[in-house]
Amino acid sequence: MNRIRRTPTWLAVVCALAFGLAACAPKTLPPAPAPATPKFPDFVFPAIPEGVAGPGITTQFQSGWNYLQLGDTHSADRTFTAVLKALPALYPAEAALGYSALARKDAQNAVQHFERAITANAGYAPALAGKGDALLALGKTEPALEAFQAALAADPSLTALKGRVDVLRFTGVQQEIATARRAAEAGHIDDARKAYQSAIAASPDSAFLYRELATVEKRAGDLAAALDHAQRAVTLDPGDARALTLVGEIHEANHEWQKAADAYSAANALEPGDVLAARADAMRERVAFDTMPEEYRTIETSPTVNRAQLAAVVAVRLESLLRRARGANAVVMTDIRDSWAAPWIQSVTRAGVMDVFPNHTFQPAAEVRRADLAAVVSHILALIGADNPKAAARWRDPRPKFADVAPTHLSYPAAARAVSSGVMSPLEGDSFQLTRPVTGTEVLAAVTRLEALAKGSS
């Protein structure tokens, strides 16, 4: 009877033990999502060589890396350890554990993991790069440099390491560089120049030193030397957007607009942004401006403006808007054949923004008055309003009061639209002064405001 009673008890104990061990066994973690913003973007992903692991292990390994980049090093460690347990020869998992230790600022432990991976594959670049980071954290500069150089030799595509290699390689001249920068900040140009030249002599392939020396030469007014050094920096490192921007600035200072535009565009291609794009556009505008006739280039300083000049400014600055509105047939005009502005006069008349007189003349030399400018503005506002009816509501049915223009006057609607849209402004005493000649500055200001409205409608 006793034996009969003990048997179920023994089975119960065994079952309980089995249940307890199962409960204590490592649980499989749920897959981690890829982070929108990696916590450690500089870590080199320890990719698994093709054919080394099956899909299940690869997926689990990627999940561990996602945990790491989410900042969950505990889950990352558990995942990588499980991967290593399943496939002990998978050295990328050792490298991954090294990066996890590095994320916890445990550089000593990280070095050990990286070295195990390197022992398995001496040319495994992710482990070499990670070892360099860990050694650098431990203050071991020379071994770190060797690790980074080995990583670059194993995988030249790790271009981000090049900057770190440069910095470490030139540790011996860091004091010289610091001296040069302090001298430059203090305005001691000669001392800065000498210090940079000394640093370059020790490390002639360092692009950033040439860029910084170019900045010093530019401040000193030696644009030729500055350009030479900046271009040398670009040659050594074509991906240095700051060096390309500096090249653009030097060309701009030399009034070499097209070369400046090319340099700014190249820099913007590397680091896209509104500032560089605007600088490139501004340089192209200068190129176009310099090729324009003198009559156009003097508009800004002209005390008065004629119809040919107004036509040219409108046609050049609002070319896209006018092109969409252009009529199929050219307008007959008998007096523009010899005008410098003939092509632009054709453009504005075909778009209907400037009128031809009943006798088929344009009168290019006729002086533009505020009533004339308001009429042109009103026509252009109609084109803009066709593209953007909501914006046009501001000036569709305006009723501003002018001290000198009654609502019944033929020019009142155009003047009212021009003022209501903000393109033109009333003058002293709330007058409009229809017959007052407009200056070049006023014309350019009005066209600039029309440009802004046109861009808002496109």
Image (cartoon, grey):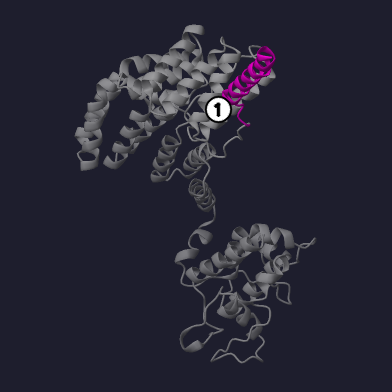
Q: Is residue 378 left or right of residue 234?
A: right
Q: In this view, does 49 lie to the left or right of 4?
A: left
Q: Quadrant of residue 452?
A: bottom right
- Residue at left 53%, top 29%? 75
- Residue at left 63%, top 79%? 417
* Numbered circles on residues, count: 1
Q: Which quarter shows the N terminus?
A: top right
- Up the image or down, 320 lies above or below 395; here it is above
Res. 446 in view: yes
Provide the major secondary structure of the magenta segment: helix
Give residue 271's position: percent from left, percent from top.
50, 39
Q: Which of 173/358 is in front?
A: 173
Give residue 352's position: percent from left, percent from top.
72, 69
Q: Which quarter shows the C terminus?
A: bottom right
Which range of residues does the magenta coloring cover?
1-30
Res. 354 in view: no
Residue 385 magenta: no
- Residue at left 65%, top 70%? 391
Q: Mark 1 points at which residue?
A: 65
Residue 19 magenta: yes
Give residue 273's position: percent from left, percent from top.
51, 46
Q: Which of 94/391 is in front?
A: 94
Instruction: Return the residue found at the far front.
Output: 1
How packed mark 1 is, by other alpha carbons closer than 10 Å (few <14, some 14-19, many 20 or more), is many
Q: In which quarter of the image is residue 190?
A: top left
Instruction: Return the residue found at the far right.
Output: 328
Which secondary structure, mark 1?
helix
Q: Is residue 420 left or right of residue 206?
A: right
- Residue at left 49%, top 18%? 95
> What amino acid type should be assigned to the residue bearing mark 1?
Trp
Give residue 180's position: percent from left, percent from top.
24, 32
